[in-house]
Amino acid sequence: MSTWKLILIALLLLSVVVLVFSSASPRSPLMERGLARWSQRHPSWVLRGAEDRSWTENLGLQLGSVLSQFLTGVVMIYLAPARTKRIADVLTRGPAALLRYLGIGLMLAVAMVAIGLLSALAVYTFPLPFILVAVFFLAALGGTIALTLTVGKALLGRAGWPAAHPWTQLAMGTLLLFSLSRLPYVGLGLLAIAAVLGAGAAVATHFGSGRPWTLAPLIEGRET
Amino acid sequence: MGDWLDEWLTQLPSESVPVHLIPAVRRRLAWERRRERTLQRAGAWLGGIAAALAMVLSGSRLGAQIGLLNPPPLGELGAALQAASASPAQALTDLSARVASWAGALDSWLLLTLALLALPAIYAASRLISLESHQMGGTW
């Protein structure tokens, strides 16, 4: 058995172990303090997702979440296969490109928050924050699904299955990224980085359309 | 302006092109490129100044007074995210109400700060995206 096949199997096992342990581990002290404050200000049903459960219930919830993320990815790759492929392709261009997409996503997030808050104050632009959030969310979702596909494809390719079905690639990537997001303390940060990176890649590729961002139609004498 | 124009200029049929045309086109190209670089540099300076101003304004006592720079504790943030995953609709309503009340209480200086933050952020994003667009054959 090749080294990469062993690595792939080890990563899969590690992902399952992370899911089981994160289901069984108690909440962090920080989270406990936060919940104590929140429970004074909010009705209990708002904090339903944070209530104490047995580890088997938590595991069931986590498996349901992995499955729902996988199915969201399946729907997305059927709705926009070519766009997803273009975004996935640019995510394989190396560390410099990834840093650039991360920068784009980060800058757009900052600009979106600032513009959203400013526009919320004017009567005629008050719906804009919701639209901006929706656009950024869709970009992040599409980009993250492309990222999971890329991760799955790269790992399966190195393990000797380069022609694996896209569902298999997606399942592999989803399980890995989901279990990474469940790591204590760093999980949420990793999820945020994946979302910002995905949003940056989606926006940089014109939402996977393959057409460049250009002002040519507004400039006379330029081809559109 | 791409470098392929220089290459094309050397491949033009010489008999039908006036002698002074190619040097004139080269001069014009060089001028266009200088102008583009100058504009980029000016944009970068403006963006940098706007970002610096925004930092100064947001770091001032004025910003701290209304709690803009007091981020919620990490535990609260985690709890908020968990609550949001449990009931997203309620979390969205809650967040909208909080943002609306917070934005309504903003001082005009802080509005300027937000605008000054948005400006360099959009400029930086556009510069980074333009690198991608150039690779795809577009112009920003």
Image: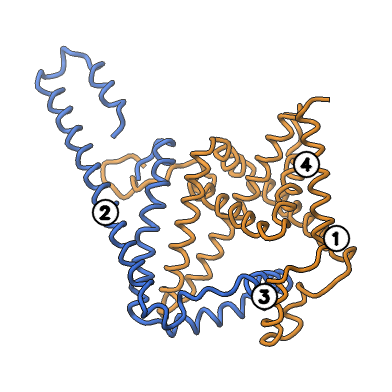
Chain colours: A orange, B blue
10 Å neighbourhood of mark 1: few (<14), some, or many (≥20)? some
10 Å neighbourhood of mark 2: few (<14), some, or many (≥20)? few
Above or below, A130 against B34 in this view is: below
In front of the other: A158 or A117: A158
Residue bearing the label numbered 1: A59
User: Disc 1 residue type?
Assistant: Leu
Q: Nearer the viewer, mark 3 or mark 2?
A: 2
Which chain does the residue under circle 4 lie in? Answer: A
Kindly report the distance in space between the C-alpha atoms of the residues bearing marks 3 and 4. 35 Å
Residue bearing the label numbered 3: B89
Q: Are marks 4 and 1 in contact (CB under 8 Å)?
A: no
Task: Give the label on residue A11, or none.
Answer: 4
Kindly report the distance in space between the C-alpha atoms of the residues bearing marks 1 and 2. 52 Å
Q: Quadrant of the C terminus of chain B?
A: top left
Q: Which residue in the rendered view is the most extreme toward the front?
A: A29
Asked if residue A216 lies left or right of residue A10, the reply is: left
Kindly report the distance in space between the C-alpha atoms of the residues bearing marks 4 and 1. 18 Å
Above or below, A102 against A165 in this view is: below
Q: Which residue in the rendered view is the most extreme toward the left?
A: B20
